[in-house]
């Protein structure tokens, strides 16, 4: 479809609906009753109102907590290292491990023994997620014993009895828990299914997106140099020096101003996001795409827009679309928003999070997670891809379902940046002298 015609579909909010399709998919994959089932008595207005907890002041608080938790997890990862000591790890596994732990405790709070618990839950999550394309394609989970086993393990850990031992839930989860607990028509397993759906929505696409953003930077040292300078300029302007004894803080206005980092993330999303935007006709209608051009639709017909091929990889919109260019979304030192096809400006030029009513309500949080993750790693670590490795390629096995995963992993090495290691060693010396 011509991307100039996308708005004609997006603006049909009532006649072309997304929620029925999404509710059915979520219910089937994550084992919970449909949220629009009248027996449950969950008003759509309440559901939509709770999404406000992913915006505004609540978003600021969520963003601050994720940065704090990321640092606590990362410092444990590099504790005991010294200047000049390199550590080696698979990059995708490293990104998954840090982000899963940090995001989970930000959303669902802290509990005793979180270290071993997060490692165990991440293994269950990763194994369950591998079957997501089959489950989305309506393969019964009874035919996927591995997925069924790992989903059951996740549901057990997300049931009310387990969550009551945790503290500091985020506003979205706390409000959702209160709403679910008041509903006597829901079993504990049903409630856990709703939490699993939110957990997957928070991580299923964010984990591979963060990997691709970091991988592309490490494979392009010129881009990493520019981004590192932008990160260091922020640290200098705020008088902050990363070290284990103090946590970095970023004001709500800082993240949007990281325009080079933002452009690099947008470029990675352009290359690796492959969501299908689906709408379902609620009645028979003639869909007007442009003056004098209509398409007849029957009730329950699907309309699908696939931005990856129609938009993201179009050489007329993005010259040399297969090549990573970190500054593709920069213009005169600011975010570039003007892209054209056929000489006409595009209303939609980058669509990793859907569009209109189907646009991901957690997109602001997801972008903040990725941006803070990259900011933190670049601020505190030296990072290098090990040489002579084959290029990691995209796995198209979940095309249409979100961010594409890698076919394999890449070995990289990291160490605390020398100034940080020196500060850490100086602090240890001071503690020893006082003792």
Image (cartoon, rainbow, N blue to C red):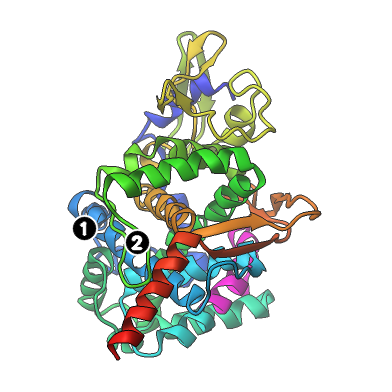
Residue 211's label in the rendered image is none
- Residue 334: x and y, percent? 39, 26
Position of 400 with respect to 156 (left or right) is: right
Residue drawn 41% across the image and 31% down it: 10
Compare residues 93 and 415 and report the one nearer the observer: 415
Considering the whole magenta stretch, tell me its main secondary structure: helix
**Foreground mark, 2 or 1?**
2
Whether residue 306 sits left or right of residue 239 in the image: it is: right
Q: Position of residue 349 (x, y in %)?
A: 49, 27
Looking at the image, residue 312 lies above or below residue 399:
above
Q: Give the mark nearest the N terminus, 2 or 1.
A: 1
Q: Quadrant of residue 258?
A: top left
Which residue is depicted at the point 40% across and 35% down? Answer: 259
Number of numbered tags placed on the structure image: 2
Q: Quadrant of the N terminus?
A: top right
Q: Residue at x 18, y 53 (%)?
A: 57
**Which label was assigned to residue 67?**
2
Identified at 45% across, 52% down, the residue is 370
Along the viewing direction, whichever of 352 and 219 lies nearer the viewer: 219
Dot label at residue 46 = 1
- Provide the residue span drawn in magenta: 122-141
Comparing 325 with 349, the one in front is 325
In the rendered image, residue 37, in percent from the top left (x then y), is placed at 34, 63
Q: Residue furthest front?
A: 433
């Amino acid at each position: 479809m011509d991307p100039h015609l996308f708005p004609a579909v997006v603006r049909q909010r009532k006649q072309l609906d997304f929620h029925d399709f999404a509710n059915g998919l979520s219910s089937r994959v994550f084992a919970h009753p449909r949220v629009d089932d009248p027996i449950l008595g969950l008003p759509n207005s309440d559901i939509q109102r709770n999404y406000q907890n992913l915006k505004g002041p609540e978003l600021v608080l969520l963003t601050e907590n994720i940065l704090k938790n990321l640092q606590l997890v990362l410092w444990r990862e590099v504790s005991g290292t010294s200047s000049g000591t390199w550590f080696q790890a698979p990059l995708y596994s490293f990104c998954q491990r840090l982000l899963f732990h940090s995001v989970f405790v930000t959303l669902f709070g802290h509990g005793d023994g979180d270290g071993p618990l997060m490692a165990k839950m991440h293994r269950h999550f990763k194994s369950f997620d591998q079957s997501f394309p089959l489950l989305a394609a309506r393969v019964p989970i009874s035919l996927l014993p591995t997925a069924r086993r790992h989903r059951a393990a996740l549901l057990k850990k997300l049931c009310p009895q387990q969550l009551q031992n945790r503290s500091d839930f985020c506003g979205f989860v706390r409000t959702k828990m209160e709403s679910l607990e008041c509903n006597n028509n829901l079993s504990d397993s049903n409630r856990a299914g709703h939490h699993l759906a939110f957990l997957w929505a928070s991580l299923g696409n964010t984990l591979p997106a963060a990997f691709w953003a970091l991988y592309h930077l490490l494979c392009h040292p010129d881009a990493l140099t520019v981004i590192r300078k932008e990160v260091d300029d922020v640290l200098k302007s705020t008088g902050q020096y990363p070290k284990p004894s103090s946590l970095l803080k970023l004001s709500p206005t800082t993240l949007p101003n990281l325009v080079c980092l933002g452009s690099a993330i947008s470029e990675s999303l352009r290359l690796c996001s492959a969501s299908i935007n689906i709408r379902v006709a609620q009645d028979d209608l003639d869909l007007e795409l442009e003056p004098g051009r209509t398409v007849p639709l029957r009730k329950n017909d699907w309309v699908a827009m696939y931005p990856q091929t129609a938009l993201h990889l179009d050489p007329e919109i993005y010259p040399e679309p297969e090549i990573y260019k970190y500054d593709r979304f920069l213009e005169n030192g600011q975010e570039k928003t003007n892209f054209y096809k056929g000489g006409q400006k595009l209303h939609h030029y980058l669509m990793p999070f859907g569009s209109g009513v189907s646009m991901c309500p957690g997109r602001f949080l997801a972008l903040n997670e990725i941006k803070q993750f990259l900011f933190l790693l670049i601020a505190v670590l030296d990072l290098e891809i090990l040489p002579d490795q084959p290029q990691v390629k995209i796995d198209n096995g979940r095309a249409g379902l979100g961010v594409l995963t890698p076919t394999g992993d890449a070995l990289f090495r990291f160490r605390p940046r020398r100034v940080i290691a020196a500060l850490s060693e100086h602090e240890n010396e001071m503690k020893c002298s006082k003792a």
